[in-house]
Image (tube, grey):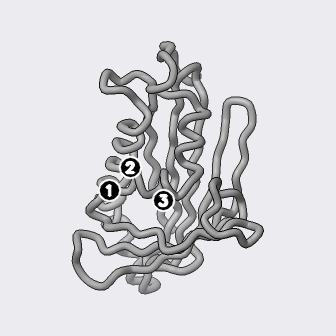
Amino acid sequence: MDSYEREVWIAAPLEDVWAFHSSTDGLETLTPAWMDLRVEAAIGPEGERDPTVLESGSEIDLSMRPFGRGPRQHWRSLITARERTDGVAYFRDEMVDGPFDHWLHTHTFYADGEQTLLRDRVEYALPFGALGGTLGPFARPGFEAMFRARHAATKAALEGDDGTSRSRPVEPGRLE
């Protein structure tokens, strides 16, 4: 099993960053255009269509066609955990059907005054068994491009042009 991790500071409070990542609208906003993402359906834990918040138990059906090449790839994710405590929040989505043999994505958010540290960690296994296992490190450039773009889109959506929060002023400081 391989893993990938990337983090970024967002000049916005945890509440804003958490809310942005809690809906399919946020997912569509932060996914790079070159992925040609479509949210085909979102079902909440009680069976409701298009829930406002993706709670634990929500299922999301996606399709994508990277760079407009090849057939659309279908992907079904399940939100398997979602917790928020004072100053820390996380949610985890697991691919239940899609192009990887295994995909577990943990999104963690750490409050630091009016800033938030966002950390993405993906544990994955490529298809094709042992052959896919040997190719795992070659997936890293694709993950790097994808998450760099996702983090840039998150910053653009939540920060002002001058790098400050769209909702509140930034207080200096870092997570210890």
Q: Residue at x 44, y 26 (%)?
A: 166
Query: Mark 2 to mark 3: distance in Å?
Result: 17 Å
Q: Residue at x 34, y 42 (%)?
A: 152
> On the image, numbered disc 2 is attached to which residue?
150
Residue 150, above or below 102: above
The amino acid beneath tag 1 is Pro
Q: Bin the neighbour count of mark 1 within 10 Å (Cα to Cα): few under 14, some 14-19, many 20 and up.
A: some
Q: Which quadrant of the structure image shows residue 86?
A: top right
Mark 3 or 1: the one toward you: 1
Horizontally, residue 57 falls left or right of residue 65, namely: right
> On the image, numbered disc 1 is attached to which residue?
32
Residue 40, above or below 92: below
Which quadrant would the C terminus be assigned to in this image?
A: top right
In contact (CB < 8 Å): disc 3 and disc 1: no
> Which residue is the extreme one toward the top?
172
Q: Earlier in the sequence, mark 3 or mark 1?
A: 3
Q: Bin the neighbour count of mark 3 within 10 Å (Cα to Cα): few under 14, some 14-19, many 20 and up.
A: some
Secondary-structure class at tag 2 = helix
Report x, y in % for residue 164: 40, 21
Secondary-structure class at tag 3 = strand
Q: How many numbered marks are there?
A: 3
> On the image, numbered disc 3 is attached to which residue?
3
Q: Return the residue nearer the eye: 149 or 139.
A: 149
Q: Earlier in the sequence, mark 1 or mark 2?
A: 1
The amino acid beneath tag 2 is Arg
Mark 2 or 3: the one toward you: 2
Q: Earlier in the sequence, mark 2 or mark 3?
A: 3
Residue 89, above or below 58: above
